[in-house]
Image (cartoon, rainbow, N blue to C red):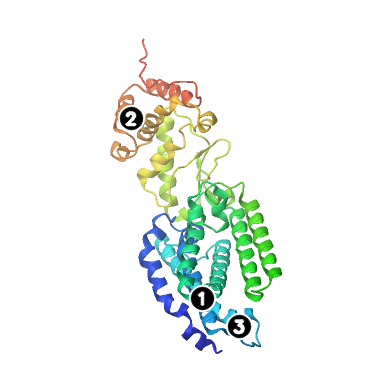
């Protein structure tokens, strides 16, 4: 059959305009809401959200093509070509429809992120292509097996459930088998965990192979057994790849990509921040100077790395930042981190000090009280402003006492002011 004839008769040709419209209009806000500006990896991850809907569309269209074959009773007649050879030209446009739908999602996310010349993450693209193929093949198989009136709706519902619901289950590794967590990748200090990609590809390929075996040998018990072995093996291997992963498919980004200056302290930024690097470094050094004048010790390096190293502090700013954000970002890196005992769920009375300490550090670094109004509670801001009116030695002693308490789960923070007596 000629390609133009296949495209003209394919259900994918009719579904494609509606699929693109759905992706652009219905999913547009979701595709752009959390994307990290100028970061291609985040664009790729955000676009993968559409897989939850494009995958079922491929499954439904594949089921329609399978039901056409069933209604025509092609395999009740003598055929020269194999079942797979017959299915391939029918399903290729369906798979292509899915790829175009995902390209539309990628375009929407990329436009919102304002990325420059670059390319999407190949690992995420591979997962999407494999998952679309798996949905298409399984949909075709169900279309061959089920009555025409039940094939498409049952396939759509089943495919949506399999693609969407694992991300809501408490067993975290299951979501990675279908690429359900890729949309959570990535902020600037994060990179994609290869285990998430490998898990989805292994499972997706196993589904494709199992479906292909059943399509080619639909009435063979041996084929059914082989398909079950493939599916079970793919599930087990995919689970093994993802079993130690958390909810998000991310790891810390390599610090080799950081661009550092020679200032005191050094300020290390990701390349995506180059358009604001001069402002960040200027305001960052101003904020550090004010903190040091107040007696606050500042490490030798301020870095945007996910996990700062020795004598480094986190520069807590986002991909699009302002002067006020830089000042509060410098201050945030000097707040003592939660101790492990608090992370393990033990009582942590020093948590009450986080708001006042953060506010005092930010005000000392040059942030305005107006900037902090929506970041800390009013009583905490009022306490920090009260402390700021005290002599410098009193302020520093208050900060150091509370910072010391915040490093332990056994100490209650002394938030009150102790006045020195002469």
Task: Estimate the x, y position of residue 393 in percent, counting from the top left.
Answer: 39, 21
Closer to the chain start, of discs 1 and 2, is 1
Quickly name the residue at label 3: 75
Quickly name the residue at label 2: 380
Q: CA distance from mark 3 to mark 1?
A: 21 Å
Task: Estimate the x, y position of residue 85 in percent, counting from the top left.
Answer: 63, 81
Q: CA distance from mark 3 to mark 2?
A: 75 Å
In terms of secondary structure, where does tag 1 sit?
helix
Q: Nearer the viewer, residue 403 or 53?
A: 53
Q: Which quarter shows the C terminus?
A: top left
Quickly name the residue at label 1: 94
The answer to whether 339 appears left or right of 359 in the picture is right
Task: Estimate the x, y position of residue 319 in percent, counting from the top left.
Answer: 43, 52
The answer to whether residue 130 is seen in the rendering is: yes
Tag nearer the camera, 3 or 2:
3
Q: Which quarter shows the N terminus?
A: bottom right
Q: Nearer the viewer, residue 103 or 164?
A: 164
The answer to whether 26 appears left or right of 126 in the picture is left
């Amino acid at each position: 059959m000629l390609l133009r004839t296949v495209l003209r008769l394919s259900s994918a040709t009719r579904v494609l305009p509606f699929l693109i419209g759905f992706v652009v209009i219905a999913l547009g806000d979701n595709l752009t809401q959390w994307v990290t500006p100028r970061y291609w990896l985040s664009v790729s991850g955000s676009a993968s959200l559409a897989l939850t809907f494009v995958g079922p569309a491929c499954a439904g269209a594949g089921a329609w093509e399978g039901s056409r074959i069933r209604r025509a009773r092609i395999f009740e007649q003598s055929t020269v070509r194999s079942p797979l050879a017959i299915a391939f030209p029918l399903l290729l446009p369906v798979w292509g429809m899915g790829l175009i739908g995902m390209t539309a999602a990628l375009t929407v996310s990329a436009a919102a992120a304002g990325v420059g010349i670059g390319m999407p993450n190949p690992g995420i693209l591979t997962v999407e292509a494999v998952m679309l193929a798996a949905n298409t093949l399984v949909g075709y198989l169900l279309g061959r097996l089920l009555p025409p009136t039940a094939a498409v709706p049952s396939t759509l519902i089943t495919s949506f459930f399999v693609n969407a619901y694992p991300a809501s289950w408490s067993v975290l590794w299951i979501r990675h088998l279908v690429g359900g967590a890729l949309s959570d990748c990535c902020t600037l200090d994060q990179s994609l965990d290869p285990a998430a990609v490998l898990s989805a590809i292994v499972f997706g390929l196993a589904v494709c192979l199992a479906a292909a075996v059943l399509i080619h040998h639909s009435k063979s018990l041996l084929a059914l057994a082989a398909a079950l072995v493939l599916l079970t093996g793919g599930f087990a291997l995919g689970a093994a790849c993802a079993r130690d992963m958390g909810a998000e498919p991310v790891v810390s980004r390599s610090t080799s990509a950081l661009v550092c200056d020679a200032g005191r302290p050094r300020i290390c930024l990701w390349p995506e921040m180059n358009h604001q690097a001069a402002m960040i470094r200027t305001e960052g050094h101003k904020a550090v100077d004010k903190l040091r004048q107040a007696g606050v010790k500042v490490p030798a390096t301020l870095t945007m790395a996910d996990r700062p190293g020795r004598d480094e502090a986190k520069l807590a700013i986002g991909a699009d930042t302002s002067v006020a954000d830089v000042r509060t970002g410098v201050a945030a890196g000097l707040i003592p981190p939660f101790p492990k005992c608090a992370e393990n769920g033990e009582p942590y009375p020093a948590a009450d000090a986080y708001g006042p300490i953060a506010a005092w550090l930010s005000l000392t670094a040059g942030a305005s009280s107006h900037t902090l109004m929506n970041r800390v509670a009013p009583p905490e801001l009022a306490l920090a402003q009260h402390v700021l009116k005290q002599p410098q030695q009193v302020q520093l002693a208050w900060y150091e006492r509370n910072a010391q308490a915040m490093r332990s789960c056994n100490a209650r923070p002394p938030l009150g002011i102790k006045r020195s007596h002469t």
